[in-house]
Image (cartoon, rainbow, N blue to C red):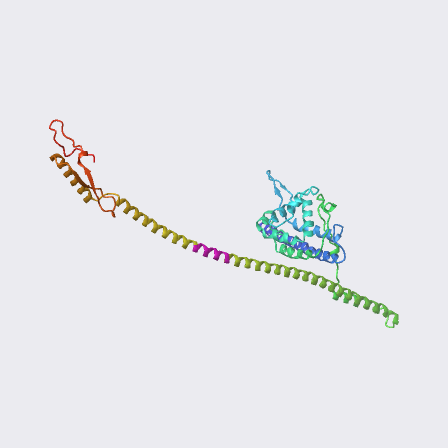
Amino acid sequence: MASLSLGLNVSRKKSAWRNGAVERKNLITVCRFSVKTLIDRSCFDTIDDSASEFTNFVSILEQILSHRLKGQVSWFGYESPRSFWDYVRVACSKVPHNCLSSIESMENVRGSRAKGRAWIRVALMEKRLSEYISTALRDFKTTRRFYEDSAIILGEEAHLLADMLIGLNAIDFSFCLKGEGLDGSCPAVIDYTPYLKFTQSSDSISSDEEELRTLGSSGSEGSSPESLEPTVFLDQSSWYSKCKRVEQKYRLALEQKGYLEELVRLRESQLSESVSQNKVLLRRMAETDLSHKMEKEQLEFIVLELQDQLTVLKNHDLRSRQELTAHLTNQWPSPGALDANAVALDTLLYQKHAGHWGDVFVLQPFTSGTEVQKPVLVDLDRVRPAACPETRQFSPLSPVSL
């Protein structure tokens, strides 16, 4: 029993994997056919909301963007359905000059599904639908958060889808964002009938013709020439069907050629734009490098000049300090001059005490290092010696005013 249940689980997983792979392949294939029909229709008519090819394309794109989309889990653990607009609003926010804010501010567009359909139309008119899808696919973290593992957006088919949508940039779309196509109340339904066509193989056609010939010739051996007319008619019809098949293959190859030419032209324009931008960046880098070198040289010159000024200021400060020290030193008399003045004063006082009054020369205090000492004439009559009141004798330690 255990092995039987294990075998059933394995078979169920294989069946689920096959169903998912077939579903992804069908949607991508139908989307490619839809893009081709849009390109063919644009050669003869303007694409708007009334075109059945555009309606089918939008339905297919909605199915692809909503494939395996995770629901939004509420606080109570319930999972509510979510629209692909919730993913586009977050993943395409990094697109420069995007139209998301303008779509959010539309008053007549309400609901996530309606806003998603409006975004598809605006992106097609801006010729940037492939750019939006490519930017959203690069944000792998956000994509993993919104989609399950087996979704188309998480597979290799998503990059094929982005490349496939580049061909739509050659079409001039014209839409009215107030029409019934923006009604988000009903889901999109894909019409597969324009892309379903049965082609009989050449071997099968040959076997049918051989069978018809056998049936026609089995009547009698002596049949009349009129019995060969159905065979000739069948041969003509077979050639006509072969011509139709060749014509269809030629048209398909021609459509593919136009699509590839448009893709190559777009890639060449992107490459030329990238080359021009690279040249501009290189020129800016060279200019910036040159300006940096000039600024560096100027700063080095300023530093050297400031160093020279600092050296001059240091020398000037040292010289000023030396001159100030010399000047302050010269303001005070030397010890020898002080001793000479003291001896002269003692002599004067002694002569006064002995009764010899007269003029006495006294040396002037030393004022500077360059001036010569000049004798000063002192009048001894003006000297008032101090004597003790009891003895009336002169005290050599008493002050004398000159």
Work out whether residue 80 or residue 250 is closer to the camera in this orientation and state it.
Answer: 250
- The residue positioned 18% from the left and 44% from the top of the image is 336
Q: Is residue 295 rendered magenta in the image?
A: yes
Q: Position of residue 299 (x, y in %)?
A: 45, 54
Q: Is residue 343 above or below residue 128?
A: above
Residue 361 visible in the displayed image? yes
Residue at the front extreme?
A: 358
Residue at the bottom extreme?
A: 222
Q: Is residue 292 left or right of residue 247?
A: left
Q: Is residue 336 left or right of residue 251?
A: left
Q: Position of residue 287 (x, y in %)?
A: 53, 58
Q: Which residues are magenta?
A: 290-301
Q: Quadrant of the C terminus?
A: top left
Q: Is residue 389 above or below residue 181?
A: above
Q: Position of residue 358 (x, y in %)?
A: 15, 37
Q: Main secondary structure of the magenta part?
A: helix
Work out whether residue 385 or residue 378 is closer to the camera in this orientation and state it.
Answer: 378
Q: Is residue 313 left or right of residue 55?
A: left
Image quadrant in which you'd find residue 201: bottom right
Q: Is residue 213 left or right of residue 173?
A: right
Q: Is residue 369 rendered magenta in the image?
A: no
Image quadrant in which you'd find residue 238: bottom right
Residue 152 visible in the displayed image? no
Query: How many numbered dots are placed on residues in this image?
Result: 0
Q: Position of residue 76 (x, y in %)?
A: 60, 38
